[in-house]
Image: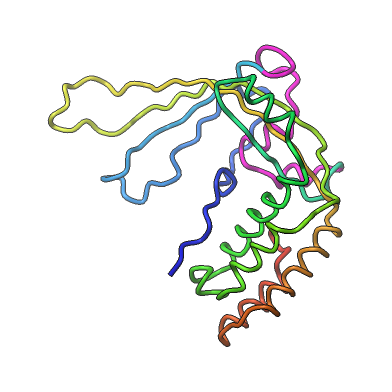
Amino acid sequence: MKLPFLIILFSIFFSACASQNKKIIFIPDSDKNNLLEQTETIESWQIIESQNGQGEDGIPQWVYSWLNRDIQAIEDTDQHKEKYVFIKEGYGDNFLALQQWADWFSVMHEFPRLVALRSERRLITAAKLYPDDEYGNFYAVFIKKISDAEFSSGILEQSFWIKRKIVTLNLEEEDTENTGDAPQDIESEQFEYYMLVSIEKKILQNQLIKLMEDARKSTTATKNQATAIANIQNSFFDGF
């Protein structure tokens, strides 16, 4: 059984919502299924600089929404209510290298990957089993078709960079061999560049509907898999 494709950076959504008057946001570690074995951490961050100057002044609201992985908040605005929005992010401690990455950013090359990641997440959340079991070969074929497709209507609307100070506090209980010292905060700073890409909903929906049908016709499936494929075709854009 194959594990699903890795979904990096875009797969975890946080429900907290940032606002411009909140300089630090606390986000607890998301995986605490076994508190006896998992290291418990709290991460806080502060925006210390942006392309508009020091501190948080002049930072667009869409950046705050993305920092909290709330893409829906961006798509709910009047400007984007008829569009799908995708964010490509880059980060590092070398600003010149990051700026070069932003200068060379290509919607034509990057947008299919963004659509593939979002589509894969939709398939995974709708599946009751592992996606390979739920949909059979349709799963991998559909994602590959998206990755190889051209989406000429995707456009880069905005870009923005920030610099964040991130503090990670380890709250793990001391073991019997510990010297008794309190756990130390881990501080780091990094530059982050965000590229906001959008596409008209109807245009993307029509392309994905065709790709889904092509993937269905080019693969074989069991009876249960065929039912799952039909269901996802009918409901794919609910929660997309």
**Is residue 2 rendered to the left or right of residue 50?**
left
- Counting from the top left corner in percent of width and height, residue 26 is at 51, 31
- Counting from the top left corner in percent of width and height, residue 180 is at 18, 22
The image quadrant of residue 236 is: bottom right
Q: Residue at x 61, y 64 (%)?
A: 123
Q: Which quarter of the rendering shows the N terminus?
A: bottom left
Q: Residue at x 40, y 22 (%)?
A: 186
**Image: 212 above or below 152:** below
Q: Residue at x 56, y 26 (%)?
A: 92
**Is residue 40 rendered to the left or right of residue 79?**
left
Q: Nearer the viewer, residue 149 or 79?
A: 149
- Outermost residue to the left: 177
- Outermost residue to the top: 54
- Counting from the top left corner in percent of width and height, residue 184 is at 33, 21
Q: Which quarter of the rendering shows the C terminus?
A: bottom right
Q: Residue at x 75, y 40 (%)?
A: 106
**Is residue 220 rendered to the left or right of residue 152?**
left
User: How many badges with numbers are in the image?
Assistant: 0
* Colour pattern of the rendering: rainbow
Q: Nearer the viewer, residue 154 or 24?
A: 154
Q: Nearer the viewer, residue 18 or 125?
A: 125
Q: The magenta stretch spans which residues? A: 50-78
**Image: 150 above or below 25:** below
- Counting from the top left corner in percent of width and height, residue 62 is at 73, 35
| Residue 184 covered by magenta stretch | no
